[in-house]
Image (cartoon, helix red, strand yellow):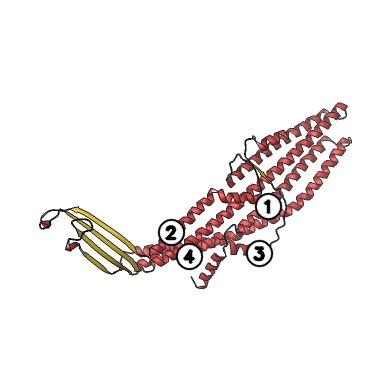
């Protein structure tokens, strides 16, 4: 037990943290760097939308020049300096649909970034859940091996007493010592697995890896009463990455329409004011004092096929997005089915392993009684002990697999963390009704 406490607790200077699963998930959502990356992507998408919208507004510019002049062209000029200022304001009236479709594409990109952030949070929740259950599993296994070491030590003491009484052979002592040494080795490995599990959990939730994290909960079984078709339907309505692919498809279509604007005319309005003279902002030169207001029509009638190539490039991106959406739909179904079947298999194993554990415990008790009564062998006791340890480990693994499969099923179904995807789903449904 002293070895166990030293390995698990570590040094007294380590930070002690008692934590539930929900607390660990919340801490990870606040500290995990992967989420910060997704937040940065969302921020970039937001400013991309702002940029697209501002492209449809007026632009004001100021161009100023200052020159030293001379020569015959300026023979009548009384000054050797010439300054000029041109103030311009322009605004697009018709861009061939480029501005409007770029705004639409940016809006789709922003929605996709919001959904991607939610999916990232779901992934973090699933990862932390798996880490937490792994701590519980490893801690339970440490308890199993520690109990086995205690049992084998007590049995070895009994065998030594019988040897001194002359009722057993020396080989019983030797075989008991070997079994005890092997079980101590298993205990050391289990303790190391626990320490690694704790460090992994700490890293994923944003704690120092050396922190002494204690899980408050235990591995347990809670029924998950939901059918596979219900899981499939829930995933279809809630998986954020599925909707993200749909928004990505709409974004690519909008970008393709924006590229088609190169085949259409553009109309811009502009106002210009030009002043110039012998000093800054002074108008004493008639040739430099002018203003203009009007519209400009520009139409690239032939551009050697550049626009057509750009449109075809965007069209290929649309085809890829369509394929990615269909692939994602198949992946979602596979994810749900895999997690669901794994959960049900683990659930069945829990009942089976529970029965096997009860029988292994009874078998071990009987073999100890038979050995103490002189009608059983030491080998039978060791074999019963091995089977008992194996049965306990199998039961723990069944509980671990069930809980991690439940967490994986939640992830596969898209059970939300922060974001309600209903408005995004409604937006897509409305677009499909309009035939977009």
C-alpha span from label 3 to label 4: 28 Å
Mark number displayed over residue 44: none
Q: Quadrant of residue 229?
A: bottom right
Mark number displayed over residue 403: 1
Is the C-beta separation of discs 3 and 2 under 8 Å?
no
Which sits earlier in the primary sequence, circle 3 or circle 2? 2
Q: Position of residue 263 (x, y in %)?
A: 35, 68
Label 4: how many residues lie within 10 Å, few (<14), some (14-19) or many (20+)?
Answer: many
Q: Determine which residue is flagged by label 3.
A: 230
C-alpha span from label 4 to label 1: 38 Å
Which sits earlier in the primary sequence, circle 3 or circle 4? 3
Nearest to viewer (mark 2 / mark 4): 2
Q: How many marks?
A: 4
Which of these two is toward me, 242 or 390?
242
Q: Determine which residue is flagged by label 4.
A: 250
Which sits earlier in the primary sequence, circle 2 or circle 1? 2
Is the C-beta separation of discs 3 and 1 under 8 Å?
no
Which sits earlier in the primary sequence, circle 2 or circle 4? 2
Is the C-beta separation of discs 4 and 1 under 8 Å?
no
- Residue shown at 82% from the left, 28% from the top: 170
Q: Determine which residue is flagged by label 2.
A: 48
In the drawing, does residue 281 fall left or right of residue 111?
A: left
Q: Position of residue 269 (x, y in %)?
A: 31, 68
**Label 4's element?**
helix
Nearest to viewer (mark 2 / mark 1): 2
Any part of residue 402 in sight: yes
**Label 1's element?**
helix
Is the C-beta separation of discs 2 and 4 under 8 Å?
no
């Amino acid at each position: 037990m002293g070895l166990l406490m030293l390995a698990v607790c570590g040094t007294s200077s380590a930070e002690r943290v008692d934590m539930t699963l929900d607390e660990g998930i919340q801490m990870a959502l606040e500290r995990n760097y992967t989420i910060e990356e997704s937040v940065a992507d969302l921020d970039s998408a937001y400013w991309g939308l702002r940029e697209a919208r501002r492209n449809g507004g007026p632009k004001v510019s100021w161009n100023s020049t200052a020159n030293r002049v001379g020569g015959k062209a300026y023979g009548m000029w009384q000054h050797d300096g010439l300054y000029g200022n041109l103030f311009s304001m322009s605004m697009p009236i018709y861009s061939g649909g480029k501005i409007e479709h770029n705004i639409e594409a940016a809006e789709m990109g922003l929605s996709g970034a919001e959904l991607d952030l939610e999916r990232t949070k779901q992934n973090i929740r699933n990862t932390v859940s798996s880490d937490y259950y792994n701590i519980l599993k490893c801690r339970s296994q440490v308890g199993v091996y520690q109990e086995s070491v205690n049992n084998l030590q007590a049995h070895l003491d009994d065998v030594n007493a019988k040897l001194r009484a002359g009722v057993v052979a020396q080989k019983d002592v030797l075989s008991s010592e070997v079994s005890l040494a092997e079980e101590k080795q298993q205990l050391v490995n289990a303790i190391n697995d626990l320490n690694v599990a704790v460090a992994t959990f700490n890293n994923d939730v944003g704690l120092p890896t050396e922190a002494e994290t204690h899980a408050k909960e235990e591995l347990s079984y809670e029924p998950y009463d939901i059918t596979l078709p219900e899981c499939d339907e829930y995933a279809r309505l809630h998986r954020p990455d599925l909707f993200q692919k749909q928004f990505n498809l709409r974004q690519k279509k909008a970008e393709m329409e924006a590229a088609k604007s190169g085949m259409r005319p553009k109309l811009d309005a502009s106002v210009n004011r030009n002043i110039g003279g012998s000093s800054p902002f002074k108008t004493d030169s008639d040739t430099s004092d002018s203003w203009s207001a009007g519209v400009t029509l520009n139409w690239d009638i032939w551009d050697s096929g550049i626009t057509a190539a750009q449109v075809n490039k965007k069209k290929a991106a649309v085809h890829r997005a369509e394929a990615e959406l269909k692939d994602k739909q198949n992946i979602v179904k596979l994810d749900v089915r895999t997690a669901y079947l794994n959960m049900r298999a683990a659930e069945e194993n829990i009942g089976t392993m529970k029965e096997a554990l009860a029988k292994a415990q009874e078998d071990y008790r009987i073999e100890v009684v038979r050995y103490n009564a002189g009608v059983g062998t030491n080998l039978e006791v060791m074999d019963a002990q091995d089977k008992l340890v194996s049965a306990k480990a199998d039961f723990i693994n069944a509980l671990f697999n069930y809980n991690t499969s439940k967490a994986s099923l939640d992830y596969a179904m898209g059970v939300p963390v922060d974001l309600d995807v209903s408005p995004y789903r409604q937006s897509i449904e409305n677009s499909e009704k309009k035939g977009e």
